Image: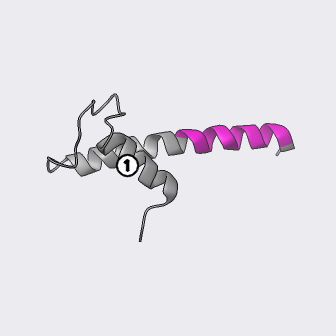
Amino acid sequence: MQPSGSSRTGGAKVSSYGMSDAIGPVYLKERPGSEMPTRIDVEVVKPLKDAYARMKFVLKKVFEI
């Protein structure tokens, strides 16, 4: 199963561009440790879950569900 566009973008932001406060500004594709893929997954999923929660809140407010 291939990751979605947002997962690929998030993964690149974390592992290629160093855009994660928790992992830091490093290029990780060259030296992933044994725990690093899990840490990257956590950092990628976090903003997606946050965006989902915000959107769910907004939709509930708009449609008063």
Indicate left or right for 52 with 41 as reference: right
Q: Which percent across, then down, holds residue 47?
A: 49, 39
Looking at the rendered image, the quarter that the N terminus falls into is bottom left
Q: What is the count of numbered marks?
A: 1
Q: Residue at x 34, y 41 (%)?
A: 14
Label 1 amino acid?
Gly
| Label 1: few (<14), some (14–19) or many (≥20) C-alpha neighbours in 10 Å | many
Q: Which residue is mark 1?
A: 11
Q: Nearer the viewer, residue 63 or 29?
A: 29
- Residue at the farthest bottom position: 1
Q: Residue at x 45, y 41 (%)?
A: 46
**Figure quadrant of residue 60:** top right
Q: Nearer the viewer, residue 34 or 27?
A: 27
Provide the residue span drawn in magenta. 50-62
Q: Is residue 30 in view?
A: yes
Q: Nearer the viewer, residue 43 or 12?
A: 12
**Does 7 appear above or below 46?**
below
Tell whether position 38 is magenta. Answer: no
Q: Is residue 64 in view?
A: no
Q: Residue at x 43, y 46 (%)?
A: 10
Q: Residue at x 23, y 35 (%)?
A: 26
Q: Which percent across, then down, holds residue 6?
A: 50, 52
The chosen color scheme is one colour
Magenta stretch: dominant SS? helix
Tell whether position 56 is magenta. Answer: yes
Q: Nearer the viewer, residue 63 or 20?
A: 20
Indicate left or right for 38 with 3 as reference: left
- Residue at the farthest right position: 63
Q: Secondary structure at mark 1?
A: helix
Q: Which percent across, then down, holds residue 36?
A: 22, 46
**Figure quadrant of residue 27:** top left
Q: Which percent across, then down, holds residue 32?
A: 17, 48
